[in-house]
């Protein structure tokens, strides 16, 4: 059942232009070590590049532990043409997903979920710091350049997004460089905001 705070959050997600948003019990988010390992092998160009991707982001075991402290989660998606996902346009969509996760996190914190935490699709290094030599956090030269937007990578944490999509009844197809946009015209990119009234461990 959706309460008033959750209803407000769903309304904010709609204002931000998401294609859909759902509230679920956070325990329904499955996290798998093997999925996080894919970032390294066969590999993603973002691997090792930023603080929000493996091997620097929290490990799947730590994320599973974190999830146990969060009763609820908001899951949102943007439907995206496959042609866009197969080209550089995906970075722009990914930027929007990060910004949306961060905005919903902030909104949740103002409406009763002090410990809200957002997560998004894609490597923040490739989205926000592609023109920079390195991630400022990893280089030890300062804080994140984009704390208002950059969030940890869902894939890097090991979230089984196909399973999660089935949980919320979102049709989803795996999009790869081999995908034919005529056969699979639409894909999606998504984010998660974990919801809890107080920081884990806070009485
Ligand atoms: S400084 Fe750039 S690469 Fe590093 S965590 Fe922030 S957005 Fe990501």
Image: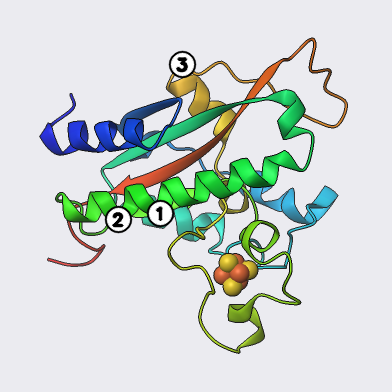
The percent coordinates of residue 116 (x first, y second) are 29, 54
54 or 190, which is in the foreground? 190
Give the mark count.
Answer: 3
Quarter of the N terminus within the rendering: top left
Residue 14 placement, left or right of 203:
right
Give the mark, 2 or 3, whose residue is nearer the N terminus. 2
Residue matched to label 3: 169
The percent coordinates of residue 95 (x first, y second) are 57, 49
Residues tagged 2 and 1 counted as in contact (Cβ below 8 A): yes
- Mark 3 crowd level (few <14, some 14–19, many ≥20, 10 Å Cα): few
Quarter of the C terminus within the rendering: bottom left
**For numbered disc 3, what is the local secondary structure?**
loop
**For numbered disc 1, what is the local secondary structure?**
helix
Give the mark, 3 or 1, whose residue is nearer the N terminus. 1
Determine whether 140 is above or below 24 in the image. below
- Mark 1 crowd level (few <14, some 14–19, many ≥20, 10 Å Cα): many
- Tell me the colour scheme of the image: rainbow
Residue matched to label 2: 106
- Figure quadrant, ligand 1: bottom right
Q: In whole angstroms, how far apart are the C-alphas of marks 2 and 1? A: 6 Å
Residue at 51% from the left image edge and 50% from the top image edge = 98
- Outermost residue on the right side: it is 178
Q: Choose mark 2 or mark 3, whichever is in front.
A: 2
Determine whether 202 is above or below 179 in the image. below
């Amino acid at each position: 059942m959706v309460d008033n705070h959750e209803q407000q959050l769903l309304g904010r997600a709609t204002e931000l232009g998401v294609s859909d948003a759902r509230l679920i019990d956070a325990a329904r988010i499955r996290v798998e070590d093997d999925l996080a390992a894919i970032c390294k092998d066969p590999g993603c160009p973002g691997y090792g590049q930023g603080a929000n991707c493996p091997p620097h982001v929290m490990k799947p075991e730590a994320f599973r532990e974190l999830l146990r402290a969060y009763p609820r989660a908001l899951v949102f998606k943007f439907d995206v043409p496959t042609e866009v996902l197969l080209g550089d346009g995906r970075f722009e969509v990914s930027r929007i997903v990060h910004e949306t996760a961060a905005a919903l996190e902030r909104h949740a914190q103002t409406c009763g979920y002090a410990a809200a935490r957002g997560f998004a699709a894609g490597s923040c290094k490739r989205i926000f710091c592609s023109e920079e030599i390195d991630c400022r956090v990893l280089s030890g030269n300062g804080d994140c350049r984009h704390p208002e937007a950059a969030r940890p990578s869902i894939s890097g944490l090991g979230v089984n997004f196909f399973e999660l999509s089935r949980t919320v009844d979102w049709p989803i197809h795996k999009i790869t460089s081999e995908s034919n946009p005529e056969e699979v015209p639409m894909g999606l990119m998504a984010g998660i905001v974990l919801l809890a009234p107080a920081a884990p461990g806070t009485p």
